[in-house]
Image (cartoon, rainbow, N blue to C red):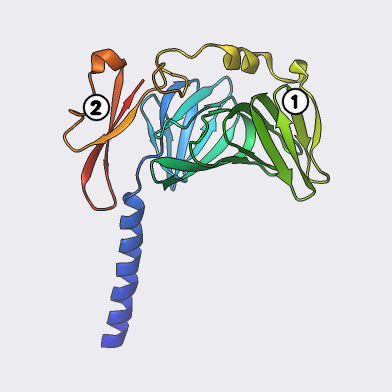
Amino acid sequence: MYKKILIVSIALFIFAATLFAEEKQDPVAVIIKTSGQVFLHRGDTNEAMKHGTVLYSGDEIVSGEASLAIVKFVDKGAIIKIFSNSILTINAKKNVKKLDKKLYAEIGNIWSQVKKESGEYEVSTPTTVAAVKGTEFLVSVDEKLTMVSTFSGVVEVRNEFGTANISAGKTATVSKEKAPDVAKTQTSSINSQILEEINTEPTPEEGNGETGDGGGNTEDSEDGGEDGGDEGEQGNMLEIQFENENGEMKTMIIYY
C-alpha cells in the first residue's frame, strides 16, 4: 500500500515538475504588429494575437484571410512577417546572448530578415530546410511544393535528394520527389501584396532588426527597466514581465 502511494506521489511530483519547468520558459519573441485575424496556439490555448503578445518556444501562429503578423526576436537577430493563410511554429533555444531559431512553416508565406552572427536560423517545411546566416528571403509553402526566394545574401536549401545555395535574385522550387530546382526569380509568381509589404520600408514600430537605426534593443532588468536607457532617445518601449528558471522576476525591455 505504501509502495503504491509512493509511486503515485513520485509520478505526481514528476508531472508537477514538468509543468513548472514549462512555465519557466523565457520569452523568445514578441508580436510588434498584426492586422486581420491572427491566432496563437499554445497547448490547449487558442487566442487572438495583438501588438505586444509575448511568444515562447513551441508557439504556433495561424493567420487568416487578408491577415499579417510581424514578429521580432528578443535577441534582435531576426524579424519575420507571416502573411495570410499561414501556419508557423516558432522554436528557439538560447545560445549565450543569441537565439538559435528553428521555425516550421506548415503552409503559407513567411518572409524573414536575419542578421549575421545572430545564432542559427532555419525554416523547415514539409519538403525542405532553408538555412541562413544573414539574409532576406521568402518561403512559400503549399500542399506539394516549397518555393524559397532570396532577396539578399545566400540561403542554403536542402532535402533528402540534394542541397543548393540560393543567391539574391534566385528562387528554389522544392518538392518531395527531387533535388531543389534553382532559377531566376519571377516576381509574377509572388503575390503582389506580399511583394508590396516586403518592399515597404519598416515603420518606427517595426524597426529593421539593426542596432542603432530603429531595430531596437533588448535588455534584462530586475528593477522595471531603470538601466534600459532613456525612452525618449530610443523611441517606444515595450516591457515584458516573466519569471526565469531560477524563479526570479525579470523585466525584458524592447525598444522599437
In this rendering, position of residue 235 left or right of residue 190: left
Question: At x 24% / y 53%, what residue is drawn?
Answer: 246
Question: At x 39% / y 45%, what residue is drawn?
Answer: 96
Secondary element at image label 2: loop
Q: Amino acid at mark 1?
A: Lys
Q: Extreme front residue here?
A: 117
In this rendering, position of residue 189 left or right of residue 54: right
Secondary element at image label 1: strand
Q: Are marks 1 and 2 in contact (CB under 8 Å)?
A: no
- For label 2, the crowd category at 10 Å Cα-Cα, with few meaning under 14, some 14 to 19 and many 20 or more, is some
What residue did someone put label 2 on? 228
Q: Amino acid at mark 2?
A: Gly
Residue 174 screen position, x and y as percent: 77, 38
Question: At x 48% / y 25%, what residue is drawn?
Answer: 70
Alpha-carbon span between mark 1 and mark 2: 41 Å
Give the label on residue 170, or none.
Answer: 1
Number of labels in the image equals 2
Work out whether residue 140 or residue 50 is closer to the camera in this orientation and state it: 140
Work out whether residue 108 or residue 151 is closer to the camera in this orientation and state it: 151
Residue 204 screen position, x and y as percent: 40, 13
Residue 155 screen position, x and y as percent: 66, 34
The part of the image, by quadrant, that contains residue 249 is top left
In this rendering, does residue 127 appear at all? no
In this rendering, position of residue 182 left or right of residue 139: right
Residue 128 screen position, x and y as percent: 70, 43
